[in-house]
Every structure is written in C-alpha cells, then in structure tokens.
Image (spheres, grey):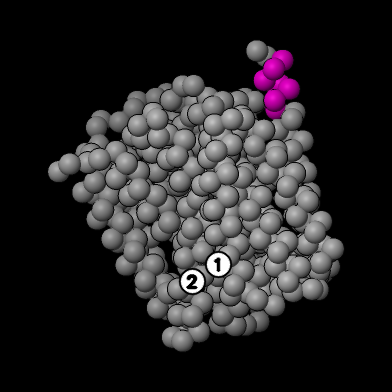
Amino acid sequence: MIRSPMLQVFALWFAGLGAAAQFSKVGVIFGPISAAYAGASEVTLGLVVSIVGFAGLIFGTTAGLLVARLGYRRVLVTALAAGALLSLAEALMPPLSLMLGLRAVEGVAHLAIVVAAPVLIAQIAPRERQGFAMTLWSSFFAVSFAFTAWIGRPLVAAWGIPPLFLIHAFYMAACAVMMWFLLPPDGTGEKTGRVQASLLRQHGEIYASARVAAPAIGFFCYTLIYVALLTLLPPETGHPAFLASAMPLASIAVSMTLGVWMLGRIPAVSMVQGGFALAIAATLALWAGWGHGPAMQAAALALAAALGLVQGASFAAIPQLNEGREDRARAAGAVAQLGNLGTTSGTPLLAALMAGHGGRGLIFFVLVPSLSGILLHQWLSARRRASA
C-alpha cells in the first residue's frame, strides 16, 4: 500500500480529533449532562468533562519514550479501539460514579493518542511542510469542539445524549482501522535507559530544562483557559449554540492563517507571548461589555482568536527549542502532561469561580494565566540566554 507522508499526517490529525472529542463530546453538552446527573455539585460535574486528563498528570512526561518502545502504530490502534469501547459504555449513561471511572480510564487512551501522534507527525512530515503539519495538529482541539458543537447540540436536543457517544465510538473505531492500514509496521522500538529512571527523577530533569519545559509551561496557561472557556462562556452570552462553534473556528482560522505566516517571521515563544497579550486585551473588552450580548460575543471571538496564536506557536516551539529527537519527545510528553493538568483543572475551577463571583470570576480566571504565560516565558528565555 502507498503511504503518502502527508496522508499519514492528516490521518493522525483525524485520530487527534477523536481524542479531543473525548473532552468535547461532554463539554459542548454540559447543560444536558448536568441535567442527567442533577443534584451533583458544579465541581463534580466539571470533572465529568476534565477527568479525562488525569492520566496525563502522572504519565505525561514519560509517555513519549514509552510509546516509542511499544510502537507507534500498536499504541495508536490500541488506544483508539479502547476509546471506542469506552464511548459505547458511556452511551449507557451509567451512574455518576461509574461514569467518572469510565472517563478516567478514557484518559489513558487520550494520553496515548496525544503523545504518540505529534511525535510521529514531526518524524514523517517533509521538512518543508513541518510548520504546516505541526500547526495543523495544534488545531485538533478547536476543530473537534467546533464540529462536535455543530452536530452534538442539535443531536442531543432531538435524541438525547447516547447517540452522540455512539457516533464517537464509531469514529474512534474507524480511526483505529485507518491507523492499522496507513501507518508502517512497528520496528523493535527504541531502547532508552531514561524510561527505566524513576518517575520523580524524570520530572526533575525535564522541568529543570529551560528548553524542554518551556513549550509545556506556556501550553499549561493556554489549556487552563481554553477548554473551560469553550464550556462555560457561551451560555453567558445569550447565544450559546453560535459561540460554541464560532469560538473554536476563530481559533482555527487565526492559527492556520496569521499564525502560520507569523511563525515564518518571529520565534514561536514571542508569538505565544503576543497571543497572551492579545488575550488580555480581549478579556478586558469582555469585562467592559459584560451583560451586552453583541459586545460579549465580539470579545469572546477576539479572545478565542488570540488563543489560537498561542496554540500553534506552543507546538512549534518544541522543535525550535529542542534539536534532538529525545528532547523533542520529552518536550512533547511535558506538553501532554501540563496540557492535561490545564484541561483537567480549568473547567471545575472556572465553574467554582463563576458560581461564587459570576462574570468577575471568569475575567480573573483568564487574566491571571495569560499574564503568567507572558512572564514565565520571559523568565525561561532569560535562563536560556544565560546558559548559551
């Protein structure tokens, strides 16, 4: 079978859409999920969305090296098949405690996909198309949220929650078959001693490096905000269906156009900082227009567009800051770990802040991580210059 490198890149991106849908299939129907489990606290309901990220909190830094040892195709096919089975089980709408358990196990499959796919994309994409390929990959969360909102909200309104989970199960199964046929057979794997090192020591080595850790630290500030905003901001504007699709589309459009253009002209880290600065400006506009539907919608779209610059540049920073394949794998693992920390903690944290402080809680929630992303990247850049 002919396996075009770019065909493989797009196939891996499709698998990434399925992995992102493990968040979005719940996030975009947060209202119906809340109604289905009426009586649960806001924080617990937020965990239904975000608990998928728990596996990445523990294993993110080592997952890249472990996947290389086990084999990329083997891991991806297994993870996608497991994701399909878990969605089938979730479609039964089990009791909340069991649903949370299924979602936590689903996080293992999610981690395997989001670590294996970008490392493989970086390896197989032609050098002249690597920038496009990595930016394409960075859009998988936004595209998935937009598409899931487009089909998911009307589907659930008409037929209830289970059909959405069944569609996701079918999609994951189809991606597993696609990976089996399109990816080359696995070799013997990389025998690296780092996988045998203690988990604590590996964390120390990675986060002590101003190059390996930098993409992940900025990405954490982004993911803390992004999924939570897509879940909880649209209902505040009076047009939740429109914004649930339009916000991720704004991120995608900016990332794939202005973002790709800018990455050819400025360093990825500078672009991350610029994206956060624009997000701060958009958040202040959102605050000024709070309570006025059109103003809130415009500011929400501007905020999503600004964060679109951050998402693409964060992945582009991995190869820009790290030359060696092993360092890139470790950086990708750290991105997965801190990205999962952000997506796991963001939604319940924002839900709690909004329950206690309303719109002011949301504004504070966006401003602090955005400013932190700028300052942390500035500090890490200074460390890299000092050690050069």
Quick check: 73 left or right of 302?
left
- Percent from the top left, x then y, of residue 100? 53, 67
Q: Which mark is residue 364?
A: none
Per the rendered image, the range of residues in magenta is 380-386
* First along the sequence among labels 2 and 1: 2
> Is 338 a magenta residue?
no
Q: Is residue 311 visible?
A: no
- Percent from the top left, x then y, of residue 33? 56, 77
Above/below status of 336 relative to 317: below
Of residue 111 and residue 280, the one placed in the foreground of this image is: 280
Residue at image point 51% right, 70% down: 149
Of residue 214 and residue 330, the one placed in the foreground of this image is: 214
Residue at image point 29% right, 38% down: 5
Q: Which mark is residue 150?
A: 2
Residue at image point 64% right, 32% down: 269
Above/below status of 127 relative to 297: above
> Is 384 a magenta residue?
yes
